Amino acid sequence: MRTSVIIVFAAVVTVCAAADAPIAIVSQSQDGPNPDGSYKWSWESANGIKAEEEGSLSGQGDDAALQVRGSSSYKSTDGQDISLKYTANEEGFKPEGAHLPTPPPIPELIKKALEWIEAHPSKDDQ
């Protein structure tokens, strides 16, 4: 019994130690933040993960908004290449990637009903 506990404990320690092995960064660059609010960074790890982002301010004072563009890529656990591009601004975060789910198409009858509602607003909406 005691030997079994020691063997199980050793196996758990071995698995945990292997999972925590650090992954080297093979390239990295950073520019900013600059006085105008812009910045740019990128990095790549030894296991093939890549990420980059750049941002700048648009507008001034209370109307200033950060405009961000970026991307990342990696291999999923099943070997599929995953690539994500995104923008972020005052309208929110907008990701793009073939791996992301997409909404189903709007049924034709619902589409016609929405068009009719838009063409015939209620008196309260006018």
Image (cartoon, helix red, strand yellow):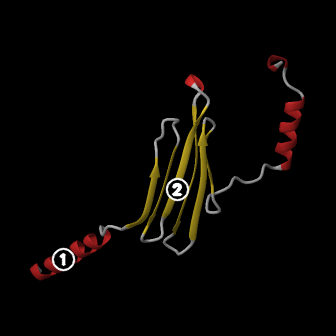
Contact? badges 2 and 1 (CB < 8 Å): no
> Could you say which is closer to the camera, residue 58 or residue 35?
35
Image quarter of residue 117: top right
> Could you say which is closer to the camera, residue 81 or residue 1?
81
Taking the image as shown, residue 126 lies to the left or right of residue 45, namely right
Is residue 32 at all visible to an observer of this figure?
yes
Q: Which residue is mark 1?
A: 10
Looking at the rendered image, the quarter that the N terminus falls into is bottom left
Q: Which residue is mark 2?
A: 52
Q: In the drawing, what numbered circle is on residue 124?
A: none
The amino acid type, in three-letter code, at marker 1 is Ala
Residue at 59 percent across and 26 percent down: it is: 60
Residue at 65 percent across and 62 percent down: it is: 98
Residue farthest to the front? 35
For marks 2 and 1, give the one nearer the viewer. 2
Looking at the rendered image, the quarter that the C terminus falls into is top right
Label 1 SS = helix
